[in-house]
Image: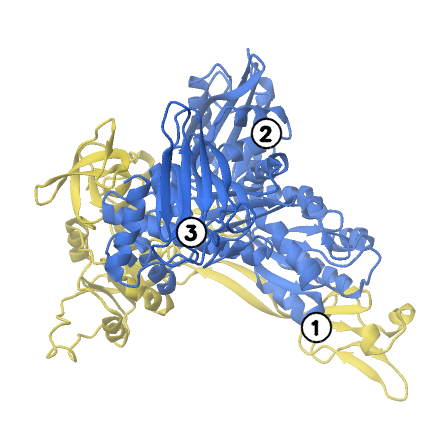
Chain colours: A yellow, B blue
């Protein structure tokens, strides 16, 4: 069953890896700071293929006489690679520094320049595991709020909770300074309000949920966007709210798992009682805290009070395993187990 | 101890197992079970999941699948283990594929059709006649992050120059750029270059040679490349899913794509059908719709994942039988992408879910039509070529009630003529396809035991008549003991006629002069015998394209009424 963690004193692990094999530059146990390079791969910046036989009008059997460099040799800009003397000398020169990577069938392939693909630490911590050839896992302890959607960007900055009445025209021009901050807003953020926020150049925008009309803008935004609960008009749960208060004016990190993937908000701090080694697997049981995923209770939370063994029929006519949940307002409701998101909020 | 076979399918969300046992010479399903699929991580959870699944099967049968410590072991060491274990896979992202060919018509299009059965997503097409210079072509190949290259093109003994240049570029791509997944290369072009390609690219076991897909000018045979594609598929999946290679070794099997496996059975059904019609299978899962069509001895398939956007949301909303505002509709669909196992608990949720399913099927059918122009689907006119049976399966169908599943299929497929709709509730086609090459009798005998649920016989009336006009008269003969029933069908009607339990119901169709009920020409009718089915005989005279009211209240009511007619 899917769950989200909302707790402090929590071990946090972040995998950072290259998209292609390279060299890992850190070792296990090493402390890393934000921006430290963990791994890099060096690949040619561009290739050039030149058909010597056809362009220099050379007979294939005489190719060797006209080649000035061999396969694998490094070349500098301007070096002659092939030459056909005569009344008008024809020459093929390297246009940049590089290396000959192929010489076959009368064609020479040059790999020129080099580009480094690097992955850096998005958060400070200790390297707890190496992924040979690819990267490492950074470990740290702190307060953690896992969200279910993000636009794929990481960010860090001072955390602020925006208290602002978007409906009040008088306040419209008075959005507070948000530059380089990670901003949480509990208000419904429409595309227009989103643009207002972006104009303030925040480091990231965190929302309880994303209205569907904002998805396209959020995906194309160059500012990190994270939704805690998903889509629609949902309120933030009280457990997340408590942790967000703790994060206020602190340096917080938003770590995304990719475009359209979950993300987490991390406030580095002291480790709690929990240790990864002794973590108990959190499973759905009577007493579990859950978030409700469907209407008419979308986004609200409650506690499981009963897990009937037999499947039940719902208003839609479909049958499914059910849970009886006591919502925060005390109301008891029966919902399909598949429509619950487990909240790991134990202190 | 009876002889047994086991089939495992590692699906996107569930991994299923079926145990087949032979008793008194007949094969039948003995046990089935499923566990959630976990393919992420270091492979330990993946192995644990399969172990749990095998344990569940062991508990419900006398077959040994685990060692004394309850661990997966080399299956050959176990006494009383299945004679063979079939393994199919659809979990994980589609394979990023490049197709390289000499022409659109003779190589690119057939290659596209070929790879679509192997859970591939074509991310790059290189047409060697486009006169792209070698550097630009290399740039394309390098930047597309391809996992599988399929090279076709050229008649045997034909021109070689451009193909040779492409092979040289592939060599560079393979050797120069380090990649997380070692790419696989399938060569199915001019056979005179096959050895050249192998020695030039030097990809060892990552190179897979096949016969030329183009058997004669203008004639292609993808089946010649299937073996090479299967080998490439397996090697790629071993790299993508930690623990899979060890599992395959322990189970002494090989892993094949789920759609390909089901395709074997769809092809078999088409070949053994003898009614001149094609066979169509639709698997509607939470995030993808897989369609496999066999017709005229040809097999095509597609696995389609529809991306949410305003256009498709609007289209789906128009097919909902409840009135839902745009924002709530979109919220449901977007949240569903995050939580695909969500169960629609309210009528409104259900109507959104099923409207969305209609659009997903429709878009998948359009994609298959694009892939295979002979498939015969037109978004407004529906499935214009004859397919019987049409087999439905997948999680979306499993959780819908029979008449709801049928309605989803009818509204999106829009069949013509007379056809039978079946439901493969246990997803047996995939399982049987993985075992068929090892014991051809097994699938035949299992299917003979009526493992598929007969949902309905659908009779579609094609006519130019206007609304309310009589288009067909039906006489129902339920036997000599029962008086004959007569039904008058008017244009716009969707009518359900119940069938006899455990027997054959005979219907006499008497269409009006301009009404075509699939008997060959308009106005021609005749007797039709139909077997007992869950929903019954459904007569669809709603017209093609579906004539839905413009007003959204009236439209939702019409959709509700049709659903009500089929079963409430």
Chain letter of the residue carrying label 1: B
Mark 1 → mark 3, Cα distance in angstroms: 44 Å
Tell me, for residue A213, which label it has, or none.
none
Q: Nearer the viewer, mark 2 or mark 3?
A: 3
Mark 2 → mark 3, Cα distance in angstroms: 32 Å
What secondary structure is marked by label 2? helix
Mark 1 → mark 2, Cα distance in angstroms: 47 Å
Q: Which residue is mark 1?
A: B133
Name the spot of residue A162 as percent of width and height, x first.
Answer: 17, 66
Against B502, is A201 above or below? below
Tell me, for residue B412, which label it has, or none.
3
Name the spot of residue A333 as percent of width and height, x first.
Answer: 15, 39
Is residue A297 toward the left or the right of residue B326 in the image?
left
Residue B37, quarter of the rendered image: top left
Q: Nearer the viewer, mark 1 or mark 2?
A: 2
Chain letter of the residue carrying label 3: B
Mark 3 crowdedness (10 Å alpha carbons): few <14, some 14-19, many ≥20: many
Farthest residue to the left: give it. Answer: A330
Of the two numbered discs 1 and 3 on the same chain, state the one appearing first in sequence. Answer: 1
Tell me, for residue B435, which label it has, or none.
2
Which part of the image, by quadrant, shows the N terminus of chain B? Answer: top right
Against A205, is B224 above or below? above
Chain letter of the residue carrying label 2: B
What secondary structure is marked by label 1? loop
Pointers 1 and 2 within a single chain: yes
Is residue A224 toward the left or the right of residue B18 in the image?
left
Of the two numbered discs 1 and 2 on the same chain, state the one appearing first in sequence. Answer: 1
């Amino acid at each position: 069953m899917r769950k989200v963690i909302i707790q402090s004193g929590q071990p946090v692990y972040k995998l950072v890896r290259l998209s292609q094999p390279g060299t890992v530059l850190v070792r296990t146990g090493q402390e890393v700071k934000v921006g430290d390079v963990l791994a890099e791969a060096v690949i040619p910046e561009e290739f050039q293929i030149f058909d010597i036989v056809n362009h220099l009008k050379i007979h294939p059997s005489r190719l060797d006489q006209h080649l000035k460099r061999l396969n694998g040799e490094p070349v500098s800009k301007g070096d002659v690679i092939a030459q056909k003397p005569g009344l008008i000398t024809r020459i093929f020169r390297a246009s940049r520094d590089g290396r000959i990577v192929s010489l076959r069938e009368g064609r020479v392939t040059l790999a020129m320049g080099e580009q480094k693909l690097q992955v850096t630490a998005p958060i400070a911590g200790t390297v707890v595991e190496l992924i040979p050839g690819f990267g490492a896992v950074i470990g740290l302890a702190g307060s953690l709020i896992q969200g279910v959607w993000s636009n794929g960007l990481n960010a860090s900055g001072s955390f602020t909770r925006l208290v602002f009445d978007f409906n009040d025209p008088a306040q419209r021009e008075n959005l507070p300074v948000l530059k380089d901050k990670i901003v949480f807003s509990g208000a419904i953020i429409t595309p227009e309000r989103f643009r207002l926020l972006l104009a303030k150049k925040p480091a990231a925008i965190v929302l309880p949920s994303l209205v569907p009309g904002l998805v396209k803008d959020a995906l194309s935004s160059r500012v990190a966007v994270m939704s805690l609960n998903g889509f629609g008009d949902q309120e933030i749960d009280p457990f997340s709210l408590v942790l967000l208060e703790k994060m206020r004016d602190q340096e917080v990190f938003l770590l995304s798992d990719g475009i359209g993937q979950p993300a987490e908000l991390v406030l580095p701090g002291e480790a709690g009682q929990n240790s990864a080694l002794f973590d108990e697997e959190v499973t759905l049981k009577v007493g579990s805290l859950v978030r409700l995923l469907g209407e008419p209770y979308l986004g609200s939370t409650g506690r499981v009070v009963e897990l009937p063994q037999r499947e039940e029929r719902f208003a839609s006519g479909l049958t499914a395993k059910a849970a009886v949940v006591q919502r925060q307002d005390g109301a008891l409701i029966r919902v399909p187990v598949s429509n619950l998101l487990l909240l790991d909020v134990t202190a | 101890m009876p002889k047994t076979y086991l089939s495992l399918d590692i699906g996107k969300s569930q991994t299923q197992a079926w145990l087949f046992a032979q008793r008194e010479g007949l094969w039948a399903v003995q046990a089935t079970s499923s566990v959630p699929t976990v393919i992420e991580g270091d492979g330990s959870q993946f192995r644990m999941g399969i172990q749990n699944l095998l344990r569940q099967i062991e508990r419900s049968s006398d077959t040994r699948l685990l060692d004394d410590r309850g661990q997966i072991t080399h299956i050959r060491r176990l006494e009383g283990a299945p004679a063979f274990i079939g393994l199919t896979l659809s979990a994980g992202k589609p394979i990023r594929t490049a197709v390289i060919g000499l022409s659109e018509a003779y190589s690119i299009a057939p290659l596209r059709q070929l790879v679509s059965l192997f859970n591939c997503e074509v991310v790059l097409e290189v047409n060697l006649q486009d006169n792209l210079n070698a550097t630009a072509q290399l740039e394309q190949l390098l930047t597309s992050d391809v996992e599988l290259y399929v090279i076709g093109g050229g008649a045997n003994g034909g021109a070689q120059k451009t193909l040779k240049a492409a092979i040289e570029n592939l060599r560079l791509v393979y050797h120069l750029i380090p990649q997380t997944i070692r790419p696989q290369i399938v060569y199915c072009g001019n056979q005179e270059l096959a050895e050249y390609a192998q020695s030039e690219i030097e990809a060892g076991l990552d190179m897979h040679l096949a016969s030329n897909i183009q058997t004669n000018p203008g004639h292609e045979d993808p089946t010649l490349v299937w073996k090479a594609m299967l080998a490439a598929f397996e090697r790629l999946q071993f790299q993508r899913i930690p623990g899979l290679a060890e599992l395959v070794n322990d189970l002494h099997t090989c892993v094949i794509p789920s759609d390909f496996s089901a395709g074997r059975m769809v092809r078999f059904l088409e070949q053994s059908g003898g009614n001149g019609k094609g066979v169509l299978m639709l698997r509607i899962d939470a995030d993808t719709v897989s369609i496999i069509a066999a017709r005229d001895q040809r097999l095509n398939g597609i696995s389609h994942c529809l991306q949410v956007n305003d256009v498709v949301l609007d289209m789906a909303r128009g097919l909902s039988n409840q009135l839902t505002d745009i924002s709530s509709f979109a919220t449901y669909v977007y949240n569903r992408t995050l939580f695909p196992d969500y169960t629609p608990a309210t009528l409104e949720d259900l109507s959104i879910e099923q409207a969305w399913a209609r659009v997903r099927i429709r878009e998948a059918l359009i994609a298959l039509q694009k892939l295979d122009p002979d498939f015969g689907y037109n978004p407004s006119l529906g499935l214009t070529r004859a397919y019987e049976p049409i087999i439905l399966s997948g999680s979306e169908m499993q959780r819908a009630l029979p008449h709801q599943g049928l309605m989803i299929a009818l509204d999106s497929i829009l069949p013509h003529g007379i056809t039978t709709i079946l439901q493969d509730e246990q997803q047996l086609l995939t399982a049987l396809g993985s075992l068929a090459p090892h014991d051809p009798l097994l699938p035949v005998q299992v299917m003979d035991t009526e493992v598929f649920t007969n949902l309905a016989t659908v009779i579609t009336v094609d006519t130019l008549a206007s609304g309310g006009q009589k288009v067909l008269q039906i006489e129902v003969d339920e036997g000599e003991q029962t008086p004959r029933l007569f039904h008058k069908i008017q244009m716009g009607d969707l009518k359900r006629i119940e069938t006899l339990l455990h027997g054959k119901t005979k219907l006499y169709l008497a269409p009006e002069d301009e009404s075509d009920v699939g008997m060959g020409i308009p106005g021609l009718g005749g007797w039709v015998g139909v077997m007992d089915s869950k929903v019954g005989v459904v007569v669809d005279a709603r017209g093609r394209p579906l004539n839905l009211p413009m007003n959204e209240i009236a439209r939702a009511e019409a959709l509700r009424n049709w659903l009500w007619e089929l079963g409430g």
